Each structure stands twice: as C-alpha cells, then as structure tokens.
Amino acid sequence: MTKREEHTATWQGTDDYIASDDLRRIVDVAVRLARPILIKGEPGTGKTLLARSVAAGLGMPLLTWHVKSTTKAKDGLYVYDTVQRLYDSRFQDHDVSDIRQYIRLGPLGESFAAKERVVLLIDEIDKADMEFPNDLLHELDQMSFTIPETGDTVTATRRPVVIITSNSEKELPDAFLRRAVFHYIAFPDRALMAEIVAVHFPDLGHDLLEAALTAFFRLRGVDGLRKRPSTSELIDWIGALVATGVDPERLRTELPFLGTLLKREQDLQVVLRQRAR
Amino acid sequence: MSDRAQRMLFGEFFFGLRDAGVRVGLSEWMALMQALAEGVVRPDLSDFYHVARALLVKHEAAFDLYDQVFAAVFADGAMPTGLADELLAWLEDPKPPPMLSPEELALLESLPLDKLRELFEQRLEEQDERHDGGNRWIGTGGTSPFGHGGKNPAGVRVGGGGGGRSAVQVASERRFRDYRNDRILDTRDMAVALKKLRRLTRHEGEPELDVDESIDETSRNAGELSLIFRPPRRNEARVLLLMDVGGSMDPYAHLVERLFSAASGLNHWRKFEAFAFHNCPYEKLYSSMWGGEGVPTADVLRDRPPETFLIMVGDASMAPSELTSKHGAIDYYHRNETPGLVWLHRLRSRFRRAVWLNPMPEAWWRGYSIELIASVFPMFPLSLEGLERAMDALVKGRTPDVPDLDPRLMGGFHLGGS
C-alpha cells in the first residue's frame, strides 16, 4: 500500500484557474492517497494550466516535463553526458574519473531530489512511445531510482504531487492506469464557462457575455464539425469582439471573426452552409 | 456495516461494474477501500460518486457505464446489462469470487480487510448524524448494503457547494453517454501487434553517434578521440489497409474501426493508407469507410511500391459470382468488367507481402467464397492472436507465393493481359 503523505493544504483553485468541484476533490484525494493524477480532456480545457494552478494553490514549486515523441523514460530521471566526458578526457583540465559531474538529473529526478515537496507535471504523456508510461511505473511507485554509473540512489524525501496529462492520442497501458487517479475534464457548462470568461475579462459587459456564450454553444452544437471550438478559442474570440467593440445585438444574426473559433477550412464551410439555409 | 453489507457493496458495485464491462481490478478497488478507510472520502454520496469514479474508472468512455451501475446499485436504476446470474448466485452463497485469478485472490487475502472494514463502518456510522435524510443510498425493500439496524443511515445529499443535486441524480443523467465509444483500450493491443511491421533502413537525416564504431576507431587511434556518426535508422515500412465495409461486415464494424484507428494513430510507418471496398475490391477503392471518393485500383497497384505491406480485412463471405463473374459486384449500378477474383489476384501479385484478416471466428470459415479468397491470400482471424500471427507472416516474408488463377473458375473470362 502506498505511503501516506501528511496532509498539507487543500487546493481550492486559484484566481486565474476555475476548477469544478469534482476536480478539486480529485486533486485533494490524489494528494492524500499519494497517487499520480491522470488528466484527460478535450484540447483547450486547461489540462496544463491545472498543474500550474495546483502548484500555486499548494504553495509548491512546479517542475514540468514536456514529453515528445522521442522522449525516453530514462531522460526524466537523469542524463549521463558521455560525449562531454569523452571530449573532456582529451585535455587535462577536468577530472573525468568523477562521473558525477556528467550526470544531470531530469525533471522526474529533480522532483525526487528537491528538498521541499514539489508538483511535477508530466505533460502529454501520450506523445511518447507506447511503452513509455510502463517504463515509469517503478519509479513513480517507489519514488526512487538508482544511477548505475555512480551507484547513487535518488530517493524522494517529500513525495512530489504528480500530474500527468494526456490527449488520448494513444491508449495508455493498463498497469499504468491502475495506479493513477483519473479525471476527465468535461467541457465546461455554460455557468462554469461564464466564470472562466470572467477571469480573463473581468470588465466584460453582461449582454456581450450572454450573447457570445449563446453563439458559442450554438456553434459547438453544429453537427459535422471536425474540431469543435474550445475554451481557448472562445477567449480569443471574445478578445477580438472586445477589441473591436462589437455590438452584442449583432451576434444574434452573424458571427464576426469566425476564423478565431474555427480553425479548419472544412468546418468554416459546414457552418457557412448551415447559415445559408 | 454488516458482513452482508460489505458483501453487497463489493458484490453489487464491484461486480456490477465488471459485469457491465468496466475494467475494474482489485487494486483499483482496494484503492477505493483505502480512501474510505482513511477518511479521504467525505461522508456524502456525491463525493463517493466522484472519488470512486476517479479511482475505479480510467477511461471516459466507461463513465456512462459507471453512471448506470451507480444508479442501479445506489438507487433503483436498471443495471446496464442486467445482473448476471453468476453474480446473483454468488450473492446467495458467497464463496471466493469466481472471476478472480489466483493472483488476485492472494492480493485480497494479503490486505488487512478486517481493519479496513472496521474503519469503513465507522465512517458510515458517522453519516447518520450529519445528514438530513431523504435520499436513496438505501435502496427500497431492504436490499441495501447499509440497511442494517432498521434505520437508513444515509439519505445522503450533496454537502454545501455547487449543484445541490444528489449523486444518483447526477449518475442518472448519464452525461457521459456521448463519450462512449465501446473501443476501450483494445486499440492499444492492436497497436502493439501492428508495431511489429517495420523495415529498418539507414536513411539520410541528422546523423547519430555510432558508439561501437567510435570506441573501435578511438582505440585504433591510440586513444585520440574519434567520433563516428552514421545516418539514423528509420522505419521505411509502407502499409496499405483495405477494408470491407459491405453489409455483412456490420456486426464487425466496431472491430474493423478499432483496427483502423489503431493503425492510423500509430504514426510508426513511413506511409499508411487505408481504402474501403464492398465485399470485394473491383476497379475502384473508396477513400473512406463511409464511401467518399473513388480511387482507381489500377493506380494503387501501379503507384504503391511492391514492398508495401498489404492488409486486407473482410469476412470474405459473398455470393461466389461476386468473385468470379463479370458484372458480379453486389452494387446494382456497379458494372465491373473484370471479376473480383482477378482484382484480388492482381493485388496479391503486386504486393508479395499480403495477408487477409477475417473478423469471423475461424470456426465459421466455411463457404466457397472464403475458400476462393483463402487460396489467394493467407487468411488469419482478426483476433489478437491472429493479428500477431499475421504480422509475423508479413515481417518474416513467409507469405507463400501466389498460385496462378485457374481461368476455369471465372467461366469464360479471359485472363490475357492481366
């Protein structure tokens, strides 16, 4: 059974990040059960921002590990710069027998070595190879790993809060999923969306907000869209509406700056065709 | 909480989820028990709903099933597929759970269940005082896990905060219906099998350090460092997937779709292409599973390099005339001048590494059309094991040479020139 961390503080969301009630609870539960949190959701629902907000809310530093298609699990632990050591061996100005100076900890390694408790974000884990998550299982469970080159063991003194995001590009392995606390960020409903918009545009007029949300959710309801507009597109769009001073009444009949909401040519065509009817 | 209560929660909720097809294992269940025992879950059903979901369900596609099972166990909703007789029988006479492997049973025994149970009961008893009653943690008719002592301890409502709706109401709403895709995780298994298809070659690009060569060369230089770089290895495999989307394939549509999404999401080959056909490919292939533009089969035959891996998917079940006759295509308006079997033979002759995946269970492979197609393509079942065998056959190049077509099969059609 996993070691239980003493409870520090409860994350409540921060001023710049509005979290739904259940998301707040999941973060709290995961922190207390010392299990990694796996966050999935449509692009643009704030998965990456969540980690930043949790870190700020709990008053812990944030370490980020952006996963790419070429990332290997070991990269997150440490990198042994053998080439540098080889080069150094040609001159007498370094003691190349000290391997430690060529070992650099990766983000996961650093989160273990940190003196204080940190939040570690493993961003877009599904970008990497299919076996990548499995390769991390042992380290995430034990919160410790050994560097064979030096014989050193890096052990977490304070178990980091691990937040993992995935865009579902690939399915994740079962063994990995079993250990995680899973949360799916559902698309915000209208009330929550109004709150989110208010964070970005505190002075937005009520009429414009209502008109924009109505138009936005109607647009999301259109059948046959390849990529439905998400929160970040809505924020951009309202930004454009505000900057140009569009009259809320106008949104009833037309959608200016449609290109900020729909990024695909085909989707624009679908919407324009529907409106023509 | 009584033994019976424990059994009911475990039996109904855990097995209800498993029965409904949610892949809940014992380690997930024990995580929930731990959360309950440690008081991480607030004594309120709404919180239990969210926390249990986060710990038990690891894919949004299964949220809908979870909602249904939750509503069935904690209210009077219906189980998604009905309680299996097996489960009911088990509840009558609880013996070691039938669906657990020996490893899982050992895990169950190694956990301090009594301790957990004690703590869990304590939490549940605390609920009496805090809540104002009137909801239905307790099902009607005394069937509830927690209904001992003649009193409903729960009647749990959402505490403070947003919404004010009960978890059962939330669950009954089934908001996650749209997220269902019934292709939970199996695409991964397929992707693992498909990944075997590779053809590694040295290729131009950012050179990589060749460690072995560098060491050799440096030794030869009496320790003077010499680094050897080489072009990187890259997977040059090209894969062509042709899928039958004809009517008799409907029962297997989800399976084929899964294969398609596994293959297209893999991003592992130099090139991946997929086309569709109805029953048998003729002079045209379709660019999507839902019809779409036609691509001349002759172009595909000519333009795709012969070393392309060809994967055909179909039930190979049709009227023999669809294979052997001119104008035999099932689509009424489609008048093919060349019999389907000839097209199949051309595909197979061009792409020497080719397999046919049949979604039907092997035991059902009877019929003349299957026999005919199996004489042209090595046929494998579209099961995980069959897929693995097929990939092995493709990579190792063990697909046998294609025999010449017997013109008599096509009654009068002249093969000349093909």
Image (cartoon, helix red, strand yellow):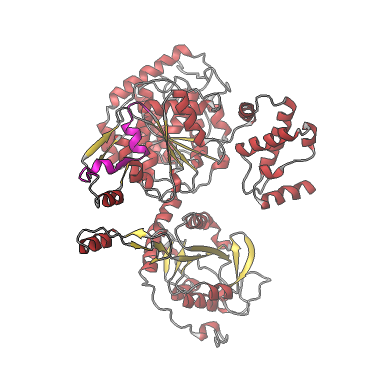
- Taking depth in this image into account, of B203 and A233 the one nearest to the observer is B203
Q: Is residue B72 visible?
A: no
**Residue A181 image-quadrant placement:** top left
The relative height of residue A114 versus residue B207 in the rendered view (above or below) is above
What segment is highlighted magenta in the picture? Answer: A94-117
What residue is at 46 percent from the left and 55 percent from the top? B266
Q: Residue B194 appears at what percent x and percent y?
A: 42, 59
- Taking depth in this image into account, of A83 and B35 the one nearest to the observer is A83
Quadrant of the image containing the N terminus of chain B: top left
- Taking depth in this image into account, of B351 and B79 the one nearest to the observer is B351
Quadrant of the image containing the C terminus of chain B: bottom right
Q: In this view, which residue lies farthest toward the top?
A: B129
The relative height of residue B377 versus residue A140 in the rendered view (above or below) is below
The relative height of residue B373 versus residue B15 in the rendered view (above or below) is below
Left or right: residue A166 compared with residue B117: right
Q: Residue B351 appears at what percent x and percent y?
A: 47, 74
What residue is at 27 percent from the left and 30 percent from the top? B111
User: Does the magenta run of residues contain B411?
Assistant: no
Q: Is residue B162 visible?
A: yes
Q: Residue B135 appears at what percent x and percent y?
A: 53, 20
**Residue B123 image-quadrant placement:** top left
